[in-house]
Amino acid sequence: MSPDNGHVDPLTAPWWAANEQKPPRRFRVWPVDNGGFARAPVAEGVEFSDGTVAVRWLRRWPTYVVISDRGVEAVEAGYIGNGTRGAIEWLDGAHGA
């Protein structure tokens, strides 16, 4: 932002600042066994400013999924809410942090 008028300079600011959007943030999905986290995450992902999520499931045959409807909520419902205990770890902090 320019100190004199409070406007974002689109030539020097990150794209999300110029568009008043939140930056993308990364996450991991961890399984939980017997009250403790497993040694390795089962997925890595990115939540984009519009709520869309891209997930890479870390299996023997890795798969990629893009979720545009309900983003992280869909990841939680599909993995953590599917009878599996787990947690999402945000690597870049909360939006606006």
Image: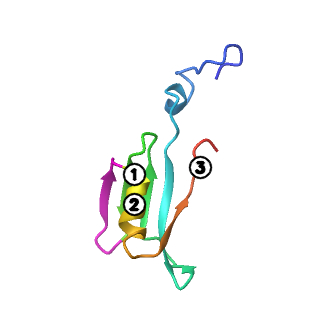
> Most extreme residue toward the top, as rendered?
5
* Contact between labelled residues 1 and 2, with CB atoms less than 8 Å apart: yes
> Most extreme residue toward the bottom, as rendered?
34
Question: Residue 38 or 61: which is nearer the viewer?
Answer: 38
Instruction: Please say which color scheme the image uses.
Output: rainbow
Spatial CA span between label 3 and label 2: 17 Å
Q: Is residue 95 left or right of residue 53?
A: right
SS of the residue under disc 2: helix
Q: Mark 3: give few (<14), some (14-19) or many (20+) Cα within 10 Å.
A: few
Spatial CA span between label 2 and label 1: 7 Å
Q: Earlier in the sequence, mark 3 or mark 1?
A: 1
Residue 82 included in the magenta stretch of the image = no
| Amino acid at dot 3 | Ala
In which quadrant is the C terminus drawn? top right
Q: Earlier in the sequence, mark 3 or mark 2?
A: 2
Spatial CA span between label 3 and label 1: 15 Å
Q: Badge 1 is on which residue?
A: 71
Residue 75: mark in rendering: 2
Q: Is residue 30 left or right of residue 62?
A: right
SS of the residue under disc 1: helix
Residue 72, quarter of the rendered image: bottom left
Q: Looking at the image, which residue is at 49% across and 30% down?
A: 15
What segment is highlighted magenta in the picture? 59-69
Q: Badge 3 is on which residue?
A: 94
Q: Is residue 73 above or below residue 13?
A: below
Q: Is residue 5 above or below residue 61?
A: above
Residue 59: mark in rendering: none
Residue 60 included in the magenta stretch of the image = yes
